Image (cartoon, rainbow, N blue to C red):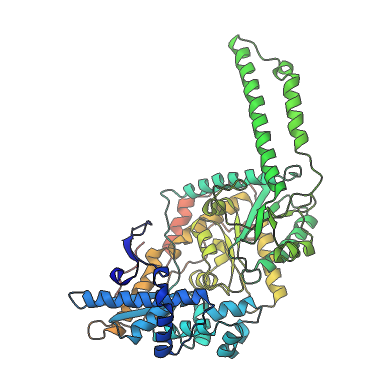
Amino acid sequence: MNAQGCKVHFGRWLIEGSPAVVLLDVGATAWSLERWKGELWESCAIGVPWYDREANDAVLFGFLVAWFLGEFAAQSEERPFIVGHFHEWLAGLGLVLSRARRLPVATIFTTHATLLGRYLCAGSVDFYNNLHSFDVDKEAGERQIYHRYCLERAAAHCAHVLTTVSHVTAAEAEHLLKRKPDLVTPNGLNVRKFSAMHEFQNLHAQSKARVQEFVRGHFYGHLDFDLDKTLFFFIAGRYEFSNKGADIFLEALARLNYLLRVNGSEVTVVAFFIMPARTNNFNVESLKGQAVRKQLWDTANAVKEKFGKKLYESLLVGNLPDMNKMLDREDFTMMKRAIFATQRQSFPPVCTHNMLDDATDPILTTIRRIGLFNSSNDRVKIIFHPEFLSSTSPLLPVDYEEFVRGCHLGVFPSYYEPWGYTPAECTVMGIPSVSTNLSGFGCFMEEHIADPSAYGIYIVDRRFRAPEEWCAQLTAFLYGFCQQSRRQRIVQRNRTERLSDLLDWKYLGRYYTFARRMALAKAFPESFTYEPPEAAAGFRYPRPASVPPSPALSRLSSPRHSDDEDERYDEEEEAAKDRANIRRPPSPPGLPPTRN
């Protein structure tokens, strides 16, 4: 292929496991675009307009993949049994061409979310109630994505095996792509297990301290709340205001603020919105806050060093120090200057950056409507960080994983979420989260856990309830979480972290293995066979047998309610009870059994 003008590179991917990887440079073969588009029209009757650069790249990539697979099969000394696993519509043309050219390849197509589904939900339609009645050709044509839709639908129908990442997406694919998926292959994560259960709790404490330092600077001059009684909530992901549930999260925060105020709660909630948007720079006031915090820290260290030196010299000669002489006038002047620098009249900024479309930004306009401006009277504070997190940021120098570990609750009340990596990442790090039964993650957890909320997985019912009920249920979850004692949150984090086995590729990878065996059996029936998968499979986590996580349940289960943080709780003992009650799933046919 390189000899014929292509650029193909082979090497090792620098990730865990170092898998072999082939890189195909689509730009180097742009001279073939018009010829290949003509061939696509003649063989598949799919036309791609000249102005759609993304679709043009998909054409180049698809023909290069089919070319590579054809060369690989032709040059193999023995008859190869090749499995081609194609993800999403951008890679789907390689699958279509492999079937059109009758290459000896068993093909799998996985859709993580249908293209038309994303566009429909972005338009604020009643998607799930009208899923069966959409005129797919008309809807795709009106959104000028008909050629993309044709590529995706062709890949779905040409594949030996069609899979999706959740049952929610399976129903979507059946109605929009007109083919029922053969298998659901949930997304997994590489889970790192700790040798001792308290290790991830220590990481939470360390990361929380980093987040608290940022909060100290951001709220300088208005730090009238106790950080030890402050909870950090967050939402993160693509800036899809309604699809990601940022709209009902903000409404629930306004109601939570009211509940905390009228009930005289000492708890303060700082809610972070980590969603990238169009900005031109950091907010000057936000940067100033971190500078003021650092100046205070340097001042305190300078005074501490002088105090310590005088104390040492006094003790060295055998005298108790005269406290009136430990600090001189210069020290007091320095401290007064530092205190004066923390004074400000304006409220702490809601947004950390200067937004390009401040007047029309959905989050900011909603904040103006509900009136959460970080005032001293508010028990709920909001920080909108419209940029992905980075450890090199001068404002909030933490990476995403460290930030998540430092928070108390992830809130993801999505309307359209085919899977949901953000709540899954929270789970493996032992951080409770809110999801919905319209997300793949939420449905997956409901299938595997008898009482998800006891394990720190709160699932909002957005499928069978009205919008007002969604918001009320989310508010109840948030307020109930705020009522928990520190000990109850520790218990809940331990339970959440124990769910990580559910999301480990060591468990979920078996479904990909089975999909590939199914594809081989369909492509090469004389060499491979398969049995239909069993309907019931998966872990089943029962309700925990020990300490309940919520204050209400705790009072009902004990004649004496205590907030004593030192009350006996054995992590290992509770974990052993859960493991004894967990029913392991039967392995799909032809696969080794699941291991502990």
Direction top: furthest residue:
317
Q: Splitting the image into 4 quarters, where does residue 302 fall?
A: top right
Q: Nearer the viewer, residue 252 or 361?
A: 361
Q: Splitting the image into 4 quarters, where does residue 234 fall?
A: bottom right
Q: Nearer the viewer, residue 144 or 351?
A: 144
In the depicted structure, whether residue 337 falls above or below residue 53: above
Name the residue rendered at 34%, 82% in the picture.
Answer: 98
Quadrant (top left/top right/bottom left/bottom right) for the N terminus: bottom left
Quadrant (top left/top right/bottom left/bottom right) for the C terminus: bottom left
Left or right: residue 384 versus residue 206 is right
Number of marks present in the image shown: 0
In the depicted structure, whether residue 270 falls above or below residue 458: above
Percent of width and height locating residue 107: 35, 80
Left or right: residue 188 versus residue 228 is left
In the depicted structure, whether residue 221 falls above or below residue 155: above
Percent of width and height locating residue 74: 23, 78
Percent of width and height locating residue 314: 63, 13
Q: Splitting the image into 4 quarters, where does residue 469 fall?
A: bottom right
Left or right: residue 247 versus residue 153 is right
Q: Nearer the viewer, residue 343 or 404?
A: 343
Direction left: furthest residue:
77
Percent of width and height locating residue 126: 65, 82
Q: Is residue 545 visible?
A: no
Name the residue rendered at 22%, 75% in the picture.
Answer: 75
Direction front: furthest residue:
31
